[in-house]
Image: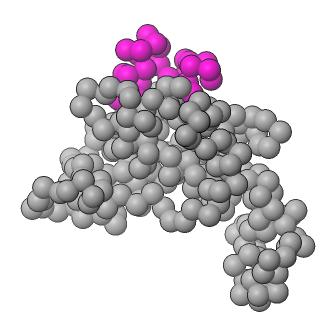
Amino acid sequence: MPDQNPSQPGRRDFLRSAALMAGAATLPARAAAEPAADAPVAPVGYLSFSPDEAALVEAMVDVMCPADELTPRGVDCGLAHFIDRQLAGAYGKGERLYLRGPFRPGRPEDGYQLPLTPEQFFKAGAQAADAACLRRHQRRFAELTPEEGDPMLQAVADGREDAAGFPLAEWFNELVYPLFVQACFADPIYGGNRDKVFWKMLGYPGLPAVNGLNMVKYRGKPFPGARQPKSIEDFS
């Protein structure tokens, strides 16, 4: 997203620094929700998203990663597909979460406390975000211009957007944004970082960077193969 708030890092600073962020968007939930009702699945290869959800996510990643001299737009980088695959898989289904009661009231510092799997939480947030957008703009998020969509996401992230009791800021900051970061810098085999565009931008060599000998030999030095990074697929 273009920087709308001086206290928020700019896109280029984010793209340079976010590569240092580790781990998945862990949601230490104690989830025990009933499965969501089946919804029509969007075409074009999405596994989890309905057509409306796909439209919203594609619009979001295009606002958060606009096309410029550094990268193509977010959809063309595969960011929406990465998020969809994560939510459709074991992570999204909550396979590593505590899913059985009894449930005790949690403290704010305990993190995620909703009775939803990550996929269910994402879908509920997508619906709440579109509802908030309809109240503010009389249009869904996918129908906004980038100039309208960016401040809308800023308001959501800052907790300034009302969502009728839904924790919209938590949804964005603890689920959407971490998945976006992972989509940018994960191995392309998972759907994002298409054509290794973010690795090339950073000069990250990909899989060779985790080789112990290379880590010792090139510590503090440019890696000779950084212009042509290697992914898991290149070694399979």
Please state the extent of the stretch shown in magenta in the rendering. 126-150
Residue 117 at x, y percent in the picture: 31, 52
Judge from the rendering whether residue 165 lies leftward or rightward of residue 223; answer left or right.
left
- Looking at the image, residue 144 lies above or below residue 89: above
Question: Looking at the image, can residue 230 be seen?
Answer: no
Residue 155 lies, in percent from the top left, at 45, 29
Residue at 46 percent of width and 32 percent of height: 53
Of 142 and 149, the residue lying toward us: 149
Question: Is residue 20 toward the left or the right of residue 157 in the image?
Answer: right
The answer to whether residue 154 is seen in the rendering is: yes
Magenta span contains residue 177:
no
Single out the residue that lies furthest toward the front: 6
x%, y% of residue 87? Answer: 45, 50
Which quadrant of the figure has residue 146? top right
Dominant secondary structure (helix, strand or loop) of the stretch shown in magenta: helix
Q: Is residue 140 above or below residue 59?
A: above
Up the image or down, 191 lies above or below 169; here it is below
